[in-house]
Amino acid sequence: MSKIREQLGPAPMCQTYVETRWKILEEILQCPEAADPEFIRVCGSQEAFAAAAFPALKIFPISRNSMYKYADIILADKFTKDNKSGRFYLDWLRKQVADLPIKTSSFRSKAQHELRRSLQSDALLEKLRSTEAALLIRGAAYLRLVQAFNLISRDPSVEELTRHRISNILAEQETLFEQTFRDEIPPFDSSNVRKLNPK
């Protein structure tokens, strides 16, 4: 190892970044259940692995070329099953970690559940607001319609029979409107509704 360090010079930062990655990979393979799921994900590609930043693990970004350059020196005495060292050994570890199953922690599952519930609640509130707005618009239109019919029912220029029938319709509608605020709504009685212009 001393000869290797002589080749590297005064402990450059790239050396530290490669050594940290190597040690973390070996630790994860020894104890997979303690691995950070996000770290396992970045091991899925060379680029993501080199660009990864995990300050808590003392892992910081490094170029892929520099990572492999220093891996060839630092890991010269580490061999894969195919008897390859250096960058090949580092990649071999990385691929093993990338193949580990990613387990979602109970905390993350709970957080995702809370997020989904919050989104569903927001969606329901939005539907409620839309329904309320639609009811207000329909209520205003209904009121204008009733007022128009009320004016017609009092217009002396309109035939008396027509005015009487309109009055019956308005009375029926008023009763139904009052019933909507009670527990039971009786079936609509159409006996009072006749054609305004019978042939």
Image (tube, rainbow, N blue to C red):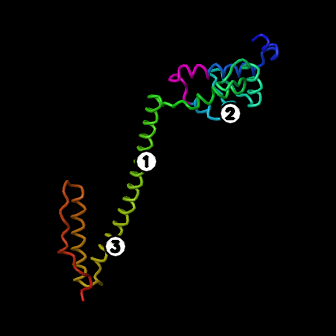
Residue in the image at 78% along x and 18% along y: 12
Q: Is residue 188 visible?
A: yes
Camera-nearest residue between 171 and 13: 13
Residue 190 rendering spot, x and y as whole percentages: 20, 73
Of tags 3 and 2, which is closer to the observer?
2
Camera-nearest residue between 53 and 73: 73
Against 93, residue 119 (above or below) is: below
Q: How many marks?
A: 3
Q: CA distance from mark 3 to mark 2?
A: 76 Å
Residue in the image at 37% along x and 66% along y: 141
Q: Amino acid at mark 2?
A: Gln
Mark 3 closeness class: few <14, some 14–19, many ≥20 residues within 10 Å? few
Q: Amino acid at mark 3?
A: Ala
Residue in the image at 28% along x and 82% along y: 156
The magenta segment: 25-37
Q: Is residue 56 visible?
A: no
SS state under label 2? helix
Camera-nearest residue between 83 and 174: 83
Residue in the image at 43% along x and 48% along y: 123
Q: Residue 159 bears which disc, if any?
A: none
Q: CA distance from mark 3 to mark 1?
A: 38 Å
Q: Is residue 31 magenta?
A: yes
Q: Residue 148 bears which disc, if any?
A: 3
The answer to which image quadrant residue 187 occupies is bottom left
Which badge, 1 or 2, comes first in the chain's sequence?
Answer: 2
The answer to which image quadrant residue 162 occupies is bottom left
Of tags 1 and 2, which is closer to the observer?
2
Q: Residue 46 bears which disc, if any?
A: 2
SS state under label 3? helix
Residue farthest along the front direction in this orientation: 82
